[in-house]
Structures are given as structure tokens and as C-alpha cells.
Image (cartoon, rainbow, N blue to C red):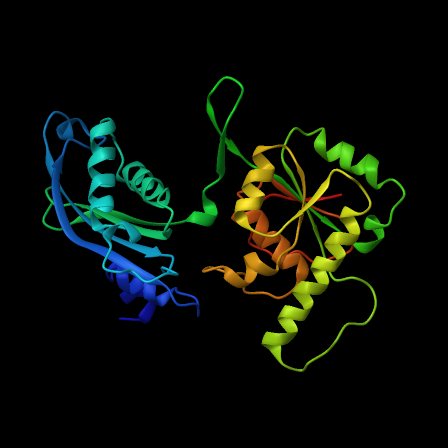
């Protein structure tokens, strides 16, 4: 059996390990949790319960302070079983896929949770177990805000990549007006400034120098229009999106602190990673740059 096939049937914990990045991460898991539920799309499944087996692994943000043996500082196992019970009690469902997605969404609402593997199997539908497994990441979950009617709405921003010619363009203000008119939160991203920068020959330090150079360019853009607010953390981005600010992204802190960080050092790839992280409506690209393929976000060429 090949490694890929073996992993396809491995426990979610092994799959989590196999797909982990180089960054350290903690995991909690729930194994072989069996409950009875009324679920299924076929007529013979309606009005009767069947056994479901749950295996769940949650990758969590490492706790930055001493635990002091305090349960309130960790993501409790109870949160996983409570998520399962709550979604089963919400309504009768036809599909395991729907149940798994809702459980993952509920788990990822916990501040510590970064990625969730959820496997659900029906144990009474045949001689073997029939099931599904999904993986969901916090990066895929859109920000939510309360609208004027008090309804919780998802916020999907417009992430815009500007080359240096556009930053200096005389019609920049008109471009900003155009993007704001789409009625979405706007996040502006930039690349490296023109001109030389220090070269260290050492990848980790060069990465920091390049990120700081991008941030200098972000401040250059912000100086062009008073609407632009330079932000560096996810909290600042969330607040600015909720309050209708025109955002310019300074990438250093978010990129360097990320558990599931971008794999490329190219500035446009960093901007696309931010678009995916914020569940953007679209990634609008100015300039002659190559955008990495395979993104979940729609790409628009300006």
C-alpha cells in the first residue's frame, strides 16, 4: 500500500502530522466517540437512530503563557463533544458532509483552534463503516459582523495588489473611489519598493528585511490618501473591516506569527495568502505580475 493510500485511511491525527508545516503546533484529539442519531437521506434511515463514530483532531495555537494547570487556558476536549452534540440537536440532517462541516465550523469558532480534521462514520449501514472526512482551517472562515438590521453577515473583502506605478499614479484616488463603490471592505497590498535594499545572503534575515521593505512601501501608499490606514495584525484588520476603513497591509507580524503561513516569499504570493486568509471576494491585481495558481479566491486583472 502506497503512503498516499495508507494516509487516506489513517487516523486524522496521522493525517494532521503528515500535512503539518514546520511551525510547532499542539493537537487535541477525540477517538472513537460513538453516539446514536437520526440521520440519512434514504427512507429506511428516517425515524430510526443509527450509530455514528467520530474521530476529531484539532490543531490549536500554542499557549504563549504558562498553563499553571488551568483548564480555562486550553481548548477542552468537552468543546469537541459539545460541538457534536449541539449540531446533532440542531436539526435532522441528510448528509454526513453537512454535519462534519458544521461541527468543524463550531470548533473553529474557539479562539485557540486553527485547523480541524473531522471524520464521521456510519456503523450500521453495512458490514463495514461508511463515512466522510473533512479538513477545515480558520483561514477559510470569513469574518462576521452585525449589519444595521442586527443580522450577522459574513465580510468578504476585496484584496487589491498595487504595483509601484499605480502607487504613484495621479488617478490613485479615483481608483480607490472605484473599489470602495463595490460595497466591500478594501485591503490594499503592495510589493517591494524600487531601488536597492540590504542583502544578507541568509534566508531568515533576508525575509525580515524584505517584509520590512514592503511595509515601507505600504506607508508610502498610505501617504497618498488620507483614507488609507496601515494595519499589521489580524485583530486590526478585523476591526478596520468592521468599521469600513481603507486598509493597507503591513505583512511582517501576520506572516511571521502564522501557524499556517505562506510557503512563498514573493510579495504577490503573500498578498494572495492574505486574500485566502480573509476569505476575500476577489483578488484584484494591478501590474505585470504572476499570480500563483490554485487559489480558492477569484482573481481579477485590473
> In this picture, is 28 found above or below 279?
below
Which residue is farthest right? 170
Instruction: Judge from the rendering whether residue 127 lies leftward or rightward of residue 180; answer left or right.
Output: left
Q: Quadrant of residue 86?
A: top left
Instruction: Judge from the rendering whether residue 26 lies leftward or rightward of residue 159; answer left or right.
Output: left
Assign the N terminus to one quadrant of the image: bottom left
Q: Is residue 125 visible?
A: no
Q: Quadrant of residue 12?
A: bottom left
- What x and y, as percent, mark residue 218? 73, 53
Assign the C terminus to one quadrant of the image: top right
> Looking at the image, which residue is at 77% across and 37% down?
176
Q: How many marks?
A: 0
Which residue is farthest front? 68
Instruction: Judge from the rendering whether residue 243 lies leftward or rightward of residue 218; answer left or right.
Output: left
> Looking at the image, which residue is at 57% across and 54% down?
273
- What x and y, as percent, mark residue 15? 31, 62
Residue in front for this viewpoint, 156 or 4:
156
> Looking at the image, which residue is at 37% across and 64% down?
25
Residue in front for this viewpoint, 275 or 215:
215
> Looking at the image, which residue is at 77% across and 32% down?
177
- What x and y, as percent, mark residue 292? 62, 58
Q: Is residue 87 visible?
A: yes
Instruction: Judge from the rendering whether residue 276 lies leftward or rightward of residue 56; answer left or right.
Output: right
> In this picture, is 253 found above or below 230?
below
Residue in front for this viewpoint, 72 or 287:
72
Which residue is farthest top? 149
- What x and y, as percent, mark residue 121? 19, 47
Amino acid at each position: 500500500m502506497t503512503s498516499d493510500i495508507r494516509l487516506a485511511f489513517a487516523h486524522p491525527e496521522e493525517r494532521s502530522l503528515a500535512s503539518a508545516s514546520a511551525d510547532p503546533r499542539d493537537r487535541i484529539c477525540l477517538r472513537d466517540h460513538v453516539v446514536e442519531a437520526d440521520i440519512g437521506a434514504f427512507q429506511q434511515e428516517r425515524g430510526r437512530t443509527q450509530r455514528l463514530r467520530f474521530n476529531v483532531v484539532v490543531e490549536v495555537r500554542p499557549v504563549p503563557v504558562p498553563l499553571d494547570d488551568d483548564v480555562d487556558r486550553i481548548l477542552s476536549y468537552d468543546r469537541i463533544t459539545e460541538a457534536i452534540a449541539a449540531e446533532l440537536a440542531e436539526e435532522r440532517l441528510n448528509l454526513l458532509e453537512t454535519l462534519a462541516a458544521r461541527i468543524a465550523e463550531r470548533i473553529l469558532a474557539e479562539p485557540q483552534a486553527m485547523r480541524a480534521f473531522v471524520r464521521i462514520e456510519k456503523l450500521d449501514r453495512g458490514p463495514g463503516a461508511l463515512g466522510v472526512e473533512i479538513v477545515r482551517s480558520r483561514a477559510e472562515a470569513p469574518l462576521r459582523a452585525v449589519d444595521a438590521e442586527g443580522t450577522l453577515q459574513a465580510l468578504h473583502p476585496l484584496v487589491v495588489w498595487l504595483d509601484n506605478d499605480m502607487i504613484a499614479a495621479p488617478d490613485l484616488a479615483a481608483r480607490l473611489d472605484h473599489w470602495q463603490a463595490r460595497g466591500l471592505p478594501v485591503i490594499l497590498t503592495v510589493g517591494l519598493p524600487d531601488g536597492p535594499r540590504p542583502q544578507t545572503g541568509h534566508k531568515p534575515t533576508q525575509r525580515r528585511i524584505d517584509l520590512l521593505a514592503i511595509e515601507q512601501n505600504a506607508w508610502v501608499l498610505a501617504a497618498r490618501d488620507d483614507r488609507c490606514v496601515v494595519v499589521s495584525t489580524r485583530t486590526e484588520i478585523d476591526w478596520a473591516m468592521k468599521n469600513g476603513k481603507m486598509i493597507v497591509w503591513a505583512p511582517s507580524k501576520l506572516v511571521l506569527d502564522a501557524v499556517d503561513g505562506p510557503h512563498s516569499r514573493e510579495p504577490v504570493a503573500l498578498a494572495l495568502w492574505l486574500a485566502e486568509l480573509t476569505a476575500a471576494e476577489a483578488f484584484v491585481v494591478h501590474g505585470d505580475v504572476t499570480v500563483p495558481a490554485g487559489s480558492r479566491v477569484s482573481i481579477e486583472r485590473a
